[in-house]
Image: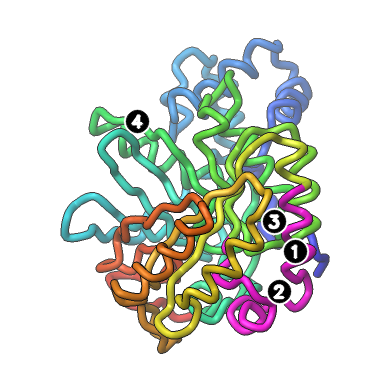
Amino acid sequence: MSSMQSPTSIPQSPTRLYDLDLPTLQSLLAGWGEPAYRVRQLWEWLYVHLATDFDQMTNLPKPLREQLAAETIIGVPQMVDTVRSADGETRKDLLRLEDGETVEAVLMRYRRRCTACISTQVGCPIGCVFCATGQMGFRRSLSAGEIVAQALHFARILRAEGERLTNVVLMGMGEPLLNYDASLSAIRRLIDPRGFNLGQRRITLSTVGVVPGIERLAGEGLQITLAISLHAATDRLRDQLVPLNRRYGLDALFEACHHYVKRTGRRVSFEWALIEGVNDSPMQAKALAARLAGLLAHVNLIPLNPTPGYAGRPSPHAALTAFTAELERHRVPYTVRLRRGVDIQAGCGQLRQHSAGQEEAT
């Protein structure tokens, strides 16, 4: 496995339209002898009208629709199960892919926005000790189309309810920067003004710190938000929580973050799951403040979400107060994030393969 990208073994026949970028789709239809404007019409059916069936594409001639149906599929995942939080603001869907693998994706409703949390891999190769996805192991990476399809899945649901998808976070199952090409292709598909047309600043990509990926992302010319799942400010502790830190330590990670800010002008967000007696001490807060000195950054704090494979507990209120007091003393901007969907295992670090509340056999 390369340090930048894990393998993707996905059935390639028939052609999955969501996997094709616009130039590739143009080549496909040109090879069929179709005029160029048909490409734009098809693109709009896929990403503007969110069509799930070729018969819905009424301005395409019937012979073209028949050929599309014979030789391609759109690539809409099958919804196997859905669970909703008690407050009704979060839903988690189990989606089956073409080869039978499944991923979880989450929709969170807020007062002024609706956010889809989508996955980039089936499982995860990183193995963070407190993360349910890491505990299940790694199966394969998703294609660009399989990533995009999760966002469009929720966009359809919201549209039917008179709402719209406003934000997308690549914070679900998997490490996006170990599936770099597919993740970036999916992002570019979502922000395409000729298609889904989601604002760049409404997309967040979360990584545990794949340094070559961060450096590469800095040169993409994008204005998305980069989020780093940090969780510790000393190498000794982070080595225990996030195994990738043994390969890309904190010095290398923060050098990459400084480079990213310099190239993009964008603030970096740092995610910190507060674990009682592990990383919630004022000493860790002080070390975090020292790491962030001179960096355009913001810290998102969230008490640990419980998972079956990790005995750690969320930090109590007193520890949270002491931790944030130290950040305030060093003038570090932070937010204590609202825990969402914990009752349905839809919170940060809780995604796994579940159906009706039970883990699927793998």
Image position of 303 (left or right of 136): left
Picture residue at 68% right of the left edge, 43% below the top: 184
Callout 3 secondary element: helix
- Which residue is found at the position 52% from the left and 69% from the top? 285
At numbered mark 1, what does the secondary structure look like: helix, strand or loop? loop
Mark 3: few/some/many CA within 10 Å (<14, 14-19, 20+):
many
Q: Please give the name of the residue rendered at 70% of the width and 15% of the height, measured from the top-left corner.
A: 34
The amino acid at mark 2 is Asn
Q: Position of residue 222 (x, y in %)?
A: 68, 33
Q: What scheme was used to colour the molecule?
A: rainbow
Residue hosting label 2? 245
Q: Where residue 156 sits in the image (x, y, percent)?
A: 36, 35
* Among the two numbered marks 4 and 2 on one chain, the one whose residue lies closer to the N terminus: 4
Q: Circle 4 sits on which residue?
A: 164
Q: Is residue 323 left or right of residue 289?
A: left
Q: CA distance from mark 3 to mark 4?
A: 27 Å
Reply above or below: 195 against 90. above
Instruction: Work out whether 28 lies above or below 270.
Output: above
Q: Is residue 72 visible?
A: no
Q: CA distance from mark 4 to mark 2?
A: 38 Å
Mark 2 surroundings: few (<14), some (14-19) or many (≥20) residues within 10 A:
many
- Discs 1/4, front: 4
Alpha carbon separation for disc pair 3 and 2: 15 Å
Residue occupied by mark 1: 7
Mark 4 neighbour density, 10 Å: few (under 14) some (14–19) many (20 or more): some
Q: Secondary structure at mark 2?
A: helix
The image quarter containing residue 71 is top right
Q: Earlier in the sequence, mark 3 or mark 2?
A: 3
Q: Are marks 3 and 4 in contact (CB under 8 Å)?
A: no
- Residue 310 locus on image (x, y percent): 44, 86
Mark sitting on residue 177: 3
